[in-house]
Image (cartoon, rainbow, N blue to C red):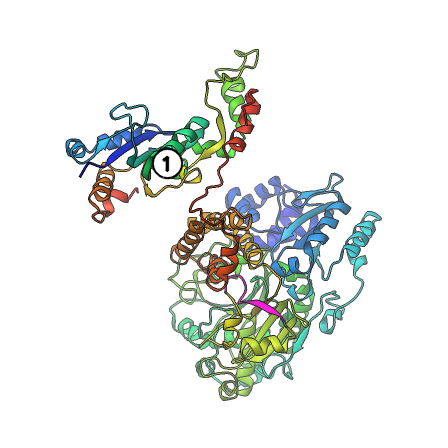
Amino acid sequence: MSKPIVATTSLAGCFGCHMSILDVDERILDLFDLVEFNKSPIDDIKEFTKMCDIGIIEGGCCNSENVHVLKDFRKNCKILISLGECAIMGGLPAMRNNIPIEECLREAYLDGPSTKGHNPDGIMPNDEELPILLNKVYPCHEVVKIDYYLPGCPPRADLIWNALVALVTGDEMKLPYEVVKFD
Amino acid sequence: MSSNVQSIVEKYGNNANRLMDILHDIHSEKGFVSNGEMKEIALLLNISKVDVEQTLTFYHFFSENPRGKYTIYLNNSLVAEMMGREEVAKTFEKATGTKFGTVSDDGLFGLYDTSCIGMNDQEPAAIINGIVFPRVTTYRVKELIRSFRQGHTVEDMINSYGGGQNQSELVQAMVTNNLNRRGAVIFSDYTPGEGLEKLKSLKPQDIIEEVKNSNIRGRGGAGFPTGLKWDFCSKAEGDERFVLCNADEGEPGTFKDRVILTERPSLMFEGMIIAGYAINAKLGLLYLREEYYYLKKHLEFVLSDFRQKGWLGNNILGIEGFNYDIRIQFGAGAYVCGEESALIESCEGKRGEPRNRPPFPVQVGYLNQQTIINNVESLSSVTKIIANGADWFKSMGTKESSGTKLLSISGDLKYPGTFEVEWGITINEMLEMAGATDVKAVQVGGPSGRLIGPNEFHRTICYEDLPTGGAMIVIGEGRSILDVVMNFMDFFIEESCGSCAPCRYLTVILRNKMKKIIDGKGVASDLDEIVHWGKQMKIANRCGLGQSAANPILTSIENFRHEYEAKIEKGKDFDTEFDLNSAIIESARAVGRFPEA
């Protein structure tokens, strides 16, 4: 039987969840025995080259590119996992959700302490090449269907490891209290 | 420091537990409590300003800002909507020139929504500067606003008096009783003092035994045996004991206590005195919802009459050492304060947030002392139990549900109002009694109860089968069950105290899912998720509000699943409703980009 194929990406996240994947330490070698990686920062494959079994998403959606990538993952992965607080709830980036986007942009480019008086033309980034910000930060499941959620900020390496092993082997997932308690 | 605030605070002995009364007094003078006044109050009570602020902002009828010379609160309960609230609301907005939730530019009118005000039998109803305006029509709205603009007072606009005590000089309310059926306990013939007379020959423990023996259970909805509660309280260790009477009936669809408070206040106060005697309390509080403020003078008159007769005060009825008095404590608009521990917090001048239980109020209650909290109807029944005996009481009703029950029936039926019936009638009989035909569903026990369909109309109203606090909302054929549920969800979102995260968030998430289904965007998995998440509400919240907030959704899916399924998109298992184009439009405009659609 061929190995299950895994893809990962980081959207509006800090890459901390990916660092936590690496935190499985020497088990990363076992992981490569168990699964094959496709599109992922881990092997630096930029585009999907085949249909994948598991897609792991870090971060929520804060701009149009995040949405395109997420939809691409949904199309190319049989199972999608929201990994960590930002993917599940929006996380820190979602703190802007109570502030109108125009106010955010003004604060960043016109009225902020480092920009006030230095941007006389009042220019805000508007190149066609740039992704467009969304009106708010969306958790992944508000954009596409998400099959599983692994909580944490970041989720513990053991939680990620247990989840992947369970998915690949079909065994029940081990969820000891230590890997899901946060206080 | 303004002498006014100072004198008000001093009137309540600079006691922080009387913060509700202090805020009420300032409010009734000028309609809001300013930031400066909050600071003054805090200083005088020796608490922090934020303590004052959090109490003030918790309650619906308190405000930090002026709410207009004429402050209009229009009820938005389900039955109000069924009876044409929408048109009335639009007319209010047009006539006053302001939107709901705001004050008109000239400062004349403040327009606000409010949760059920206990007038479901005469909707749509509004409260304007504390005066209840039942059965409001669009015509009446125009007349009211026109007259207010001409300088008439709100009192000028009282154009009729409801029957019974509503027309007494002390009430003069337009509210009608709609007491459609008198029964053998609450609304039977009654001479004030007939329960108290028995105290002379009974010891406190005898009273408790008699109440226990009557098998009476709490009429507020939870159904806890009243005698047992009193027994626990009287045996708990402590210095002081209190009797609280819960007159906060905020469950949408219930208004039976309003009729007791209007027509039989003595019966209730007697029950409070009997309770005080039984558990050896010195003070009883009647926690009255602000919506019933119009009954204040009427109730206070009864209390002063009791004092004159020697039924309150020292050595009551000549019983040596039986010293007891009753005071009215007003709420200020918060459904959750009907929950007993939240009610205690409110009586202590705090936000109405439920406490963790145990310890129960009988152990640690008002001012951390031993406290019993009983419903208006329970205490009124007790008076009759003591007057006529437990055996008499038990001869009515069913085995586990003795006596009578007041039902507040409203909605799509001929005779909305209060009905006193013996426990044990079926829903079918109830509908026939109240003149309801072509009934699609009945909401038993208000939003926190169960929504049942005709296949359950054979069931019996009693603790053994279908328990209820008395709210019965009749929903006729032709109404959408989903609209009914949406109204209830909005209610729970508005009234959640916000203490438990699932109650604070999940109610909103569930409402949004409902909205999605109503808009025809729902898919099958939405329904599964609603059921799955709704069940979490029961286990993850502290009080009855949070635990039952998903009941309307869950019981309606259980009994009317077809109405949901009819709205659900076929052949699609997932739809988040996310639309990229509308999500980027705002920021694209802000930076001056115009992406292709």
**Residue B266 versus residue A83: which sits nearer the camera?**
A83
Is residue B313 in view?
Answer: yes
Marked residue chain, label 1: A
Residue hosting label 1: A74
**Residue B289 versus residue B529: which sits nearer the camera?**
B529
- Residue A3 percent location from the top left of the image: 20, 36
- Residue B79 percent location from the top left of the image: 63, 61
B112 vs B377, left or right, is: right
B270 vs B157, left or right, is: left
Element type where label 1 sits in the image: helix
Q: Residue at x 65, y 70 (%)?
A: B413
- Is B557 rendered above or below residue A35? below
- Residue B441 percent location from the top left of the image: 56, 67
B113 vs B154, left or right, is: left
Q: Residue at x 18, y 32 (%)?
A: A32
Amino acid of disc 1: Arg
What is the span of residues highlighted in magenta in the rendered image? B438-450
- Is B473 rendered above or below residue B210? above
Does the segment drawn in magenta span residue A41? no
